[in-house]
Amino acid sequence: MKPAVKSDELLFSIGSYFIVSVFTILSVIPFLLVLSGSLTDEGAIISNGYGFLPVPFSLDAYSYILSDFSQILRSYGVSIVVTLTGTAAGLYFCTMTAFVLSRQDFRYRNRFSFFFYFTTLFNGGLVSTYILFVQYLKLKNNLLSLILPGLLPVFYILIMRSFIRSMIPASLIEAAKIDGAGEFRIFMGIVLPLVKPALACIGLFYAIGYWNDWYNAMLYITDIKKYSLQYLLTSVINKADFLTKSSMSSATVAEARESLPSESLKLAMTIVSIGPIVFVYPFVQKYFVTGLTIGAVKG
């Protein structure tokens, strides 16, 4: 026989579901407006503003974006390679660094922790970073220049270190060492399997960061064949803004300006660029509760 549900618990559940439902609807509304606006005729957006229904329906913005379909596919490939490689490498090195810093028997852990923390407050700035990548590392027009800058965020290392400390007791490491396991085997065979929630959570942060990054491509990539998707779309928006605001009165510029769906173009680019991340999120969201409450339990 099931126990009776208390009235206060029932009211709490109803209130919780209501509040979550309201925030869910409020979160979905902007996305629906963007999707509808990307499918609406440019003239209707200028005259009537944005609406939830694409009236009149138009694919002009998508036709403009996909006019160079091979370049879109190439940029998609660059972004996918950079995101997958950067996320996998970032998770590996971030977890390894956090594991070392979490060990109480590592004599210099405080000095290394201070070194990592210090770089979050003071760094060399843009000029020195650019000179390092271009002049010394020779990474101009190299995809590594899109991966290395975001490989080891200190914030992720600190989160992972806290998770390892809370989830993996020192006695487990000592037992593995007594059984003959080396440090690398302990890391690969014990640490990595036990930190899967944190890996999923931080991995999504890594993936979003790499996928949305266009700034590093602007600095280090000049070969259009190596443009990331975000930088390609940014370039298209800048080109559209230039045509819209241009004071040139030539017939070619005037014709291009009239045929350009500037407002719906920005919305269509948003839809094109967020697609893969939207598909990835449902597969890792179940780890978010565990991953985001890292360090919440003390003692």
Image (spheres, rainbow, N blue to C red):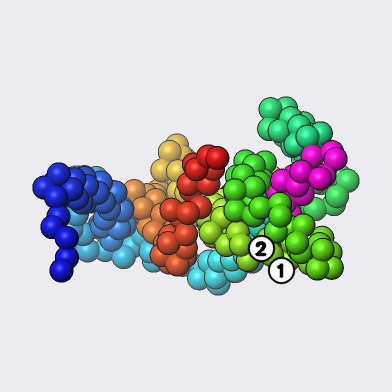
Q: Which residues are magenta?
A: 96-109
| Residue name at image x 31 percent, y 65 percent | 59
The answer to whether residue 168 of the structure is visible from this angle is yes
- Density class for disc 2 (Cα within 10 Å; few <14, some 14-19, many ≥20) is some
Mark 2 and mark 1 in contact? Answer it, CB < 8 Å: yes
Q: Nearer the viewer, residue 181 or 24?
A: 181
Residue 155 location, quadrant: top right
Q: Tell me: residue 6, above or below residue 81.
A: above
| Residue name at image x 29 percent, y 49 percent | 27
Distance of label 2 from label 1 (alpha carbons):
7 Å
The picture places residue 191, in percent across and down from the top left corner, at 68, 61
Q: Is residue 106 magenta?
A: yes
| Residue name at image x 85 percent, y 50 percent | 137
Residue of label 2: 192
Residue of label 1: 189
Residue at disc 2, secondary structure: helix
Quadrant (top left/top right/bottom left/bottom right) for the C terminus: top right
Residue 185 location, quadrant: bottom right
**Side of 9 where 269 appears, left or right:** right
Residue type at tag 1: Gly
Q: Nearer the viewer, residue 97 or 135?
A: 97
Q: Tell me: residue 110, above or below residue 66.
A: above
| Residue name at image x 53 percent, y 39 percent | 298
The answer to whether residue 143 of the structure is visible from this angle is no
Quadrant (top left/top right/bottom left/bottom right) for the N terminus: bottom left
